Structures are given as C-alpha cells and as structure tokens.
Amino acid sequence: MKKINNDGSFYLNPYLGGVILGTVLLLSFYISGRGLGASGAVKNSVAATVNMIAPQHVEHSAYYSQFAGGDKKPMSNWLVFEVLGVLAGAFLSGIIFNRIKIKVEHSPKITERRRLLFALGGGLIFGFGSQLARGCTSGAALSGMAVLSLGGYITMIAIFGTAFGAAWLFRKNWI
Amino acid sequence: MIGPIISSGIISPAWDNLFAVILGMGFGFALESSGFSSSRKIIGTFFGYDFVVVKVFFTAAIVASLGLLYLSYLGLVDFSLLYIQPTFLASAIVGGVIMGIGFAMGGFCPGTSLCAAAVGRIDGLVFFGGMFIGVFLFSEAFPLFENMYYSGSLGAKMINSVFGISPELFTFILVLAAVGMFIGATWIQKKVKKVEY
C-alpha cells in the first residue's frame, strides 16, 4: 500500500477494495439473507413522505401501496438502516484517508453550475430507471450477480453497456 | 451456524436492523476507500483512464459468488432462504438502459453518490437529491409503465440454468472472464492518456 498523501488522493488497491466489498456482501447474505442496496431506501423515503402528505393517494396507488400505507412502516426498513450505515462508513473512510472536503468535483473545462445540473439530471434519470429495474447497481446488479440471478446479470450488462455509449455523448463534461 | 442466521431464526429478527447499519458501514467504507466518492474516478472506466469500477465491482462479485458457493457446499448456508432478485426481462433491460444514461450524465450510481455526499462532495448530494425526484416521477407515472414492469416474468431464475450448466461451472467461467477483463483493463489504462482529477 502507498503512503497516505495529505491531498486526499490515497485509495485502497482496487482488488483489496473489491475483496472487502465482496466480503461485506457475502456477510449480508449470510446474516440477513439478502444483498446490499441503495435505491430501495430512496423508494421507501419517497413512499413514506407521500404517505404523510396524502395517505389516500398512497392507498389508491398500485406502486406506493406495496411499500407504504396501512400497517406498513416504510422507514423501519432494512435498506433504510443500511443506507444510514453507508453514510457513516463512507464518512469514516473519508476521515481516515483525509478526503473530507466540501467541494463540487468537476472537469476544469466545465462550470460548477453545469456539473451540478448534470448531477441533478443524472440522479433523476438513475432514480427513475432503478424503480423500473427493481434495484440499482448494488441492489439489482451486484447483489443479483452474487446469487447468479439472471435479472441481475441482464441489468448489469444494460447499465454498463449503455453507460459506455452514453459517456461518449457526455464526454465534454468529463475529459 | 447455518445461514442466513436471521431468516433461519438463529438470531432474533430484532437484531436485523442493527446488522443492517453495520453491514451498511462496511459497504460505505469499501466504496469510499476504493475511490467511489469521486465521479471523475468512477467515470474513468468509460474513457479508459481509470478502471477502478471494473476492478472493484467484478472482484466483489467473484468473492461473494464463490463465498456463497463454498458456504453452501459446506452446508453453512441454506440457499433457498436467500433473496434472489426475480427476473423480469423487459423492465430489467429498459430500466438498466435508463440507469446507464443517468450514470454517464451524473457520474454516480445511488450508493456512490451517497458516499460522495458523506465526504462533502456537493455533486454527490445533488445527484442523490435528483434520485428522489426520479423515484417520485416513476411512482406517479406507474400506471403508464405497469405492463412493462410485470412483463417477461421468469421468477427467481438463475443465469447458469439458461446455459444448462451448474452454478459452480458458471462461477468458474465468471472468474476466468473477470481475470481476462482485469488484464485487458490494465493494458488499456497504460495506453490511454492520463486525466488529472
């Protein structure tokens, strides 16, 4: 492992990072019988918020009513707790490797404003797609792949395949 | 102890949420320490200047797949109690394509945007905020997508059964394919001009 630089550029060896991530995923299946996720917590938060404002709307929605309304407790959900842990774990790593810094990361060729607009749009589109595919890169693709789910592999190939092409369209934002 | 230890009742389900926090911490730590809090590092995979995403993602998939096979072989995990992502062909493909566009635009996926926000990256926080809008729009527009959402249902289908091979053989091929990808990625990365970020 390299010496820790003060500019926050120190990263774990990617294969070591992968082994740690894979071991956490394995433990998740061994302990809780399920994989890791991220977008599911957003789904539950949205359903809980809508349920607070318009409970009748949730009751009549074929989508929300799967997660909220009635006796369901969308915020007392495994994924919601897991995502709180993700925040804490990433913050801890940021402290250890000296990366905590408030900034907008962007290519020097674009403005901060442009970067933030694309981040917002990207998040919106990703969030939309994650609901259609029943999970994101972690919940559907990575966790699905660990248990050899066909759907997990299909989603993984669709995400990365499309991103390779789409990245070229957005290349001015990155390189 | 035969896993999954919560579903099989060895440990009370009351502990499940505590484990969720601890596992989430491991997840967040692994992502951030590998460099997934930086959108320009993540996106490097698509331009060939940094393949950290490919290396971390596929190493993790191999470790977890092999680990589950070994635990199952040793009788330490009951595969039938594990949650297997169900397969719905149309929504898996279309949803994946939509996510790919969002990925290339925003430079994050949901988990990594959260890690970026945790270390103070405003672009990560904004991406995460954008997700709430996207999820809300999908939920409201659900009747329009309901047919697609449920079409092509194959249940908890496993990929090895599509090829008519055993899970062990499939995983072995996966390991070979991943090692091939790692070698290829390292080779390409040496040829591509470095990008400062």
Image: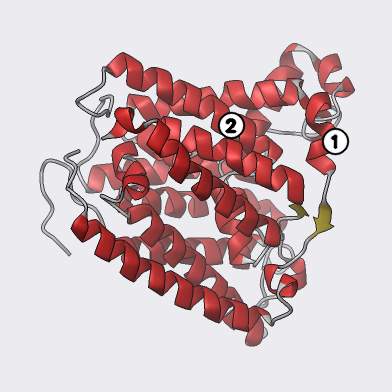
| Residue type, label 1 | Asn
**Residue A31 sits in quarter:** bottom right
Dot 2 falls on a residue whose secondary structure is helix
The relative height of residue B77 versus residue A104 in the rendered view (above or below) is: below
The relative height of residue B84 versus residue B100 in the rendered view (above or below) is: below
Mark 1 lies on residue: B147
Residue A148 falls left or right of residue A91: right
Q: Which quarter of the rendering shows the C terminus of chain A?
A: top left
Q: Which residue shows up at 62% across the image and 38% down it? A: A130
**Residue A56 sits in quarter:** top right
**Residue B156 place in picture, x, y as percent:** 78, 61
**Residue A88 sits in quarter:** top left
Callout 2 crowding tier (Cα within 10 Å): few <14, some 14–19, many ≥20: many
Residue B143 falls left or right of residue B176: right
Q: CA distance from mark 1 to mark 2?
A: 19 Å
Display colour scheme: secondary structure
Could you tell me if the residues under marks 1 and 2 are in contact, i.e. CB atoms within 8 Å?
no
Q: Which residue shows up at 27% across the image and 28% down it? A: A106
Instruction: Using the image as rendered, state which of residue B34 and residue A157 is in the foreground.
Output: A157
Residue B132 is labelled as: none
Q: Which residue shows up at 82% across the image and 58% down it? A: B155
Point out the frontmost of discs 1 and 2. Answer: 1
Instruction: Give me the chain letter of mark 2.
Output: A
Residue B164 falls left or right of residue B69: right
**Residue B168 place in picture, x, y as percent:** 62, 82
Mark 2 lies on residue: A127
Instruction: Give me the chain letter of mark 1.
Output: B
Q: Is residue B54 visible?
A: yes
Instruction: Using the image as rendered, state which of residue B78 and residue B19 is in the foreground.
Output: B78
Q: Which residue shows up at 34% across the image and 41% down it? A: B37
**Residue B118 place in picture, x, y as percent:** 37, 35
| Residue type, label 2 | Gly
